[in-house]
Amino acid sequence: MGDPLKKIRDCLIDLDEDCVVRFVKEALSSRLSATEIVLGPMSAAMEEIGRLYEEGEYFIAELIEAADIFKKVMGLLRERLREEASQLRGKRRCLKVVIGTVKGDIHDIGKTLVAVMLQAAGHEVIDLGVDVDAGKFIDAVVKYGAEVLGMSALLTSTAKYMKEVLNELEKRGLRSKVFVIIGGAATTPEFAEEIGADAWAKNAVEAVKILNELAEGRRDSWTGRK
Ligand code: B12
């Protein structure tokens, strides 16, 4: 990690907003990309902040402050993130994607980042926000005729709810028509497989790649599933 990147990470861990902003600007002027900044040191700092919380060194107030700083920086970088993601624009067609953080979970930074980048990459995104229950997900899939459903969970307790959404899709006879992609710190590729999701992505860039592949027919499509 180059110097401004390390500084961004350290300043965010210290919850020093001015310092984060200063080094984000410095990183941009030394030609580092906004995507690199957000998915690299900014995300790494959030992980470390989570660890400090777990160890009792940080409390909820610090998590809230960190989230505020992250959102401010995302505001600053939004246009650049869009420009960079638009270069990942798929060649063939765009997909309609319904996305949200599952019921009981209010973490929205990662989900929003995924939504912003998918949109910039040319997909149509309907972002349902946080604390979304199965009914709301499914109603939106039907209403917008979405081909993709994206679910985010950061809590081990809420990740399980994804299975309920999948069961509900099945019950409504929609499972074979919708490609389900999941993500968030409480999920893993193994978990995705276990609950029967179609894909898992570790970050926003991976999510864009997977959905572009799907749109271009380079990935096993969900059609034809039993
Ligand atoms: C900031 C934060 C908060 C903020 C959230 C503010 C907000 N507006 O989002 C606040 C203070 C509200 C909060 C609250 C809580 N939190 Co919290 N929080 C965090 C923290 C530090 C950072 C999360 C974050 O924003 N990361 C940065 C983003 C960019 O990363 P990301 O979300 O992982 O997203 C990326 C990928 O995962 C992926 N992705 C994400 N979503 C999706 C969706 C799809 C479809 C795809 C394809 C990909 C994808 O792409 C994203 C971008 O690259 C994490 C630590 C951690 N390790 O995650 C704890 C953490 C998630 N929180 C935790 C806990 C315990 C809580 C509370 C229960 C605390 C409490 N006692 O009240 C509450 C729960 C509230 C609730 N009901 O949801 C624990 C969860 C433990 C567990 N395994 O269950 C963690 C892991 C901290 C820890 N180590 O203990 N939290």
Image (cartoon, rainbow, N blue to C red):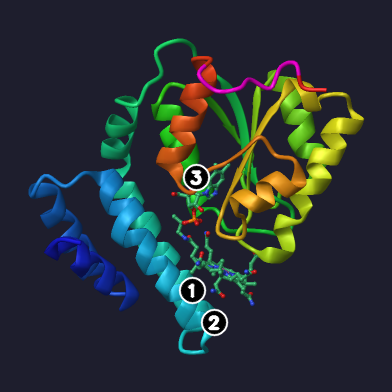
Question: What residue sits right under mark 1 in the picture?
Answer: 50
In the displayed structure, 40 sits above or below 53; it is above
The secondary structure type at the circle numbered 2 is: helix
- Is residue 220 one of those drawn in magenta? yes
Q: Position of residue 187 (x, y in %)?
A: 62, 55
**Separation of marks 2 and 1 at Cα, in angstroms:** 6 Å
Vertical order, 204 against 175 (above or below): below
Residue type at the position of mark 3: Thr
Q: Quadrant of the C terminus?
A: top right
Quarter, ligand 1: bottom right
Q: Secondary structure at mark 3?
A: helix
- Compare residues 11 and 219 and report the one nearer the observer: 219
The crowding category of the residue bearing disc 1, from other C-alpha atoms within 10 Å (few below 14, some 14 to 19, many at least 20), is: many
Front-most of 58 and 40?
Answer: 40
> Helix, strand, or loop for circle 1?
helix
Kind of residue at disc 1? Gly
